[in-house]
Amino acid sequence: MISSKISKPQKSQVIFLAVLIAIITINCGKITTASDELIGIWKTSNIRYKDTSFEIKKKAITFNTKEGDSNKFTIIKIKKELMQDKEWVQYTIFYRDRDLQKAEFPFYFLSTNSGMIRFENQPYLVWKKDSSTKT
């Protein structure tokens, strides 16, 4: 039996190495900060959403309502998936809401023309980065 031929210090090293490999494998591909192309304040020209926006920072997302409320959340992770058309990218930002429940903010991103964001449930709306403000 192989395990009987391994000394105790070697067993500890093997266990440590196995745990390290498991941690690396689990975290592989996990994005925890937003890329530069996403960072900024995003607005739409649709009159229904006048005075609303959302802001993506490296490690936070903020939703701003027309009533003046601002809800900021820390990003837990970001999932990125290239769509079949090879132009649009589907992002999902994971964060914890006010009740500390895991929440998701999925959207589609196109990098042309300083970037565009669309939501699956509102594909007719285009959100663009606000170039008049500095983030």
Image (cartoon, rainbow, N blue to C red):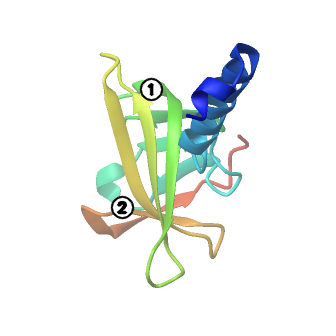
User: Which residue shows up at 59% across the image and 51% down it?
Assistant: 29
Residue 43 position (above or below residue 120)? above
Query: How many badges with numbers are in the image?
Result: 2
Q: Quadrant of the N terminus?
A: top right
Residue 30 image point, x, y percent: 57, 45
Query: Visible in this render: residue 60?
Result: yes
Q: List the residue tagged with mark 2.
A: 46
**Mark closer to the chain start, 1 or 2:** 2
Three-letter amino acid code at the position of disc 2: Asn
Q: Quadrant of residue 94?
A: top left
Say left or right for 133 vs 116. right
Q: Which mark is residue 70?
A: 1
Residue 51 position (above or below residue 95)? below
Q: Nearer the viewer, residue 132 or 15?
A: 15
Question: Tag 2: Cα neighbours inside 10 Å, few (<14), some, or many (≥20)?
Answer: few
Contact flag, marks 1 and 2 (Cβ < 8 Å): no
User: Which residue shows up at 61% across the image and 70% down it?
Assistant: 111
Say left or right for 7 vs 22. right
Question: Tag 1: Cα neighbours inside 10 Å, few (<14), some, or many (≥20)?
Answer: some
Of the residues tagged 1 and 2, which is closer to the observer? Answer: 1
What kind of element bears circle 1? strand
User: Which residue shows up at 54% across the image and 40% down it?
Assistant: 26
Say left or right for 31 vs 104. right
User: Which residue shows up at 35% across the image and 24% down it?
Assistant: 97
Residue 22 image point, x, y percent: 57, 37
Residue 35 image point, x, y percent: 67, 51
Residue 59 image point, x, y percent: 62, 33
Say left or right for 17 vs 55. right
Q: Quadrant of the C terminus?
A: top right
